[in-house]
């Protein structure tokens, strides 16, 4: 797809950046919500069967991957972690700070790749619905920004719910 200079696309790119790691009027973004957290912080669960911050981070990375895949009409199967949507974290074999940082890096890398995919969408393709999908490219891109903000809010709530030592 040819690169577009459309105003719509510029607004969408700004929205996904503000939701992820750029300053915005709405308050904390996803990257800001996890800044400074340790593996122990990210692993805390409010109750059995509830997601923790670490799982929300990998979930957000996964959905960035899904949007990339749909924008580029790629097949499934290239996400670096086996599975889909929700991933148990910490995994049995990786509860270290290094494993936490690796998953935060995965989120950041997926965001960079998402931006590249969005930059490649032409203005005329914004309203196109990719094969096998029921949502237009415009809705996918706007939706992934909303998804980041939704989970940033959840993370902020989880941080406040965690009992202080």
Image (cartoon, rainbow, N blue to C red):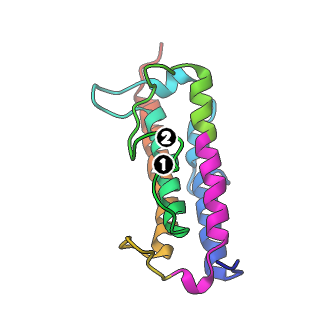
Where residue 62 is drawn, which disc sits there?
A: 1
Q: Position of residue 19 (x, y in %)?
A: 57, 56
Residue at 48 percent of width and 33 percent of height: 54
- Dot 1 falls on a residue whose secondary structure is helix
The span from disc 2 to disc 1 (Cα, nearest Å) is: 6 Å
Q: Residue 80: x, y in percent?
A: 54, 42
Camera-side residue of 131 and 41: 131
- Residue 48 occupies quadrant: top left
Q: Classify mark 1: residues with Cα within 10 Å, few (<14), some (14-19) or many (20+).
A: many
- Number of labels in the image equals 2
The reply to whether dot 2 and dot 1 touch (C-beta < 8 Å) is yes
Q: Residue furthest bottom?
A: 124
Q: Over which residues does the magenta segment extend? A: 106-126
Q: Taking 68 as reference, is 123 above or below it?
A: below
* Disc 2 packing (10 Å; few <14; some 14–19; many ≥20): many
Seen at 72% across and 81% down, the residue is 5
The residue nearer to you, when weighing 96 against 143, is 96
**The N terminus: image quadrant:** bottom right
Does 27 appear above or below 121?
above
Residue 153 is left or right of residue 116, and the answer is left
Q: Nearer the viewer, residue 116 or 156?
A: 116
- Residue placed farthest to the top in the image? 165
Which mark is drawn over residue 58? 2
- Relative height, residue 13 to residue 48 (above, below): below
Residue 117 in the magenta stretch? The answer is: yes
């Amino acid at each position: 797809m040819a690169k577009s200079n459309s105003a719509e696309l510029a607004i969408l790119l700004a929205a996904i950046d503000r939701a992820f790691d750029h300053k915005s009027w709405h308050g904390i973004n996803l990257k800001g919500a996890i800044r400074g957290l340790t593996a122990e912080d990210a692993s805390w669960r409010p109750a059995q069967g509830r997601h923790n911050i670490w799982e929300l981070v990998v979930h957000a990375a996964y959905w960035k991957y899904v949007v990339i895949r749909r924008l580029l009409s790629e097949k499934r199967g290239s996400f670096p972690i086996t599975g889909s949507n929700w991933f148990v974290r910490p995994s049995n074999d990786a509860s270290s700070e290094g494993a936490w940082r690796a998953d935060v890096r995965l989120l950041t890398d997926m965001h960079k790749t998402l931006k590249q995919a969005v930059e490649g969408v032409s203005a005329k393709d914004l309203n196109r619905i990719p094969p096998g999908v029921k949502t237009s490219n415009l809705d996918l891109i706007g939706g992934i920004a909303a998804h980041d903000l939704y989970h940033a809010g959840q993370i902020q709530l989880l941080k406040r719910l965690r009992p202080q030592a």
